[in-house]
Amino acid sequence: MIEVNDVIEQAGDKNMYVVTEIIGDKLFCLQVEEEGKTMDKMAVLDVRTATEVTAPVILEVDPLEEDDERPIDEVPDEEDEA
């Protein structure tokens, strides 16, 4: 079942959309650019022609290396190094 904030595509359409509102069998959406940003282009799609897109898994990356266990306030500023 498609819900608000789902990323969907429509049969025969290569564009992807983010659902912003659902009223009856109409999905109100914002079109998604290739870079993953939403555009100002609105679309109204029929719920029967929409397919939910499986979102890619995004892994969180720790910015500190495993060996670097210093607290953040002990990391030298760029200004201190100069």
Image (cartoon, rainbow, N blue to C red):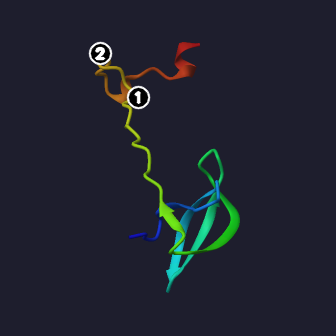
| Amino acid type at image mark 2 | Asp
Q: Is residue 56 above or below residue 50?
A: above
What's the residue at 37%, 37% (across, down)?
A: 60
Q: Which residue is mark 2?
A: 67
Q: Residue 6 placed where, x, y %?
A: 46, 63
**Mark 2 element type:** loop
| Amino acid type at image mark 1 | Pro
Q: Residue 58 placed where, x, y %?
A: 41, 41
What's the residue at 50%, 23% (across, down)?
A: 77
Question: Distance between the Cα atoms at labels 1 and 2?
Answer: 12 Å
Image-based side of 64 in relation to 49, left or right: left
Position of the N terminus, as image quadrant, is: bottom left
Label placed on residue 81:
none
Q: Which residue is mark 1?
A: 63
**Mark 1 element type:** loop
Residue in front for this viewpoint, 4 or 8: 8
Image-based side of 67 in relation to 48, left or right: left
Image-based side of 12 in relation to 23, left or right: right
Query: Looking at the image, which residue sits at the far front?
Result: 12
Residue in front for this viewpoint, 6 or 9: 9
Position of the C terminus, as image quadrant, is: top right
Q: Is residue 25 above or below residue 9?
A: below
Q: Quadrant of residue 62?
A: top left
Residue in front for this viewpoint, 4 or 76: 4
Q: Residue 24 placed where, x, y %?
A: 49, 86
